[in-house]
């Protein structure tokens, strides 16, 4: 496996198409709505999502990475970076994260997101990262704040309003 990052309890690695069934469980857990662009949430949807993620690895040198527990290698979510358009014009690199709902409240999202933020600034030398979060997603806003992102502005992502949090690279 190609591990990108490791934390105390987690490993982040590139997704493979063999992750489709496990990722489908995470996407279908009811914790967050699926992204409508791929259609109905099923195995085909999940495979298309993984293919887009894998394309980002090749084109951008980063993407959403599979989050697995060190102890048992179970896939528990994703965390990583991807290019987004907020307000249809503003291109940005977003820090995105999603953890299996049954594991919420254990600090996994924050642990993974801190590692990805550090990678974005220390290795990729990005000048800033953002997170576009739905207005009613208090948990994700709390993770963003713990990682150091601060509320920046209101935005629209894929036609839905969101709050945009941002952090700038203090090493630049």
Image: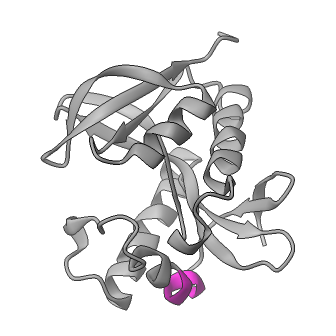
Image point 72% across, 42% down: which residue? Answer: 115
Main SS, magenta region, reads helix
Picture quadrant of residue 3: bottom right
Picture quadrant of residue 143: top right
Residue 71, position as x, y percentages in the image: 87, 74
How was this image coloured? one colour
Residue 159, position as x, y percentages in the image: 12, 47
Image point 56% across, 62% down: which residue? Answer: 78
Q: Looking at the picture, tell me which residue is in the foreground, 98 or 13.
A: 98
Q: Looking at the picture, tell me which residue is in the foreground, 57 or 166.
A: 166
Count of numbered marks: 0
Image point 18% across, 32% down: which residue? Answer: 87
User: Which corner quadrant holds the N terminus?
Assistant: bottom right
Q: Compared to 139, does 114 lie above or below?
A: above
Residue 40, position as x, y percentages in the image: 21, 82
Q: Residue furthest left?
A: 159
User: Which corner quadrant holds the C terminus?
Assistant: top right
Residue 91, position as x, y percentages in the image: 31, 31
Picture quadrant of residue 27: bottom left
Q: Compared to 7, does 167 lie above or below?
A: above
Q: Looking at the picture, tell me which residue is in the foreground, 11 or 89.
A: 11
Image point 29% across, 46% down: which residue? Answer: 136
In this image, 157 relative to 84: left or right?
A: left
Q: Compared to 140, does 53 lie above or below?
A: below
Give the magenta part as a residue range: 18-22
* Residue 20 lies within the magenta run: yes
In this image, 82 relative to 17: left or right?
A: left
* Residue 95 lies within the magenta run: no
């Amino acid at each position: 496996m190609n591990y990108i990052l490791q934390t105390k309890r987690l490993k982040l690695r590139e997704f493979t198409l063999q992750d489709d069934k496990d990722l489908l469980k995470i996407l279908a857990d009811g914790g967050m709505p699926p992204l409508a662009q791929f259609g109905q949430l099923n195995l085909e949807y999940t495979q298309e999502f993984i293919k887009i993620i894998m394309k980002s690895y090749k084109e951008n040198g980063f993407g959403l990475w599979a989050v697995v527990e060190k102890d048992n290698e179970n896939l528990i979510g994703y965390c990583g970076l991807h290019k987004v358009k907020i307000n249809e014009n503003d291109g940005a690199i977003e820090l995105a994260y999603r953890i299996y709902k049954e594991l919420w409240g254990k600090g996994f999202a924050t642990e993974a997101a801190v590692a990805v933020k550090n990678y974005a600034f220390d290795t990729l030398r990005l000048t800033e990262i953002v997170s576009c979060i739905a207005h009613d997603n208090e948990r994700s806003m709390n993770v963003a704040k713990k990682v150091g992102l601060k509320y920046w502005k209101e935005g629209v992502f894929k036609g839905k309003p969101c709050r945009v949090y941002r952090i700038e690279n203090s090493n630049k």
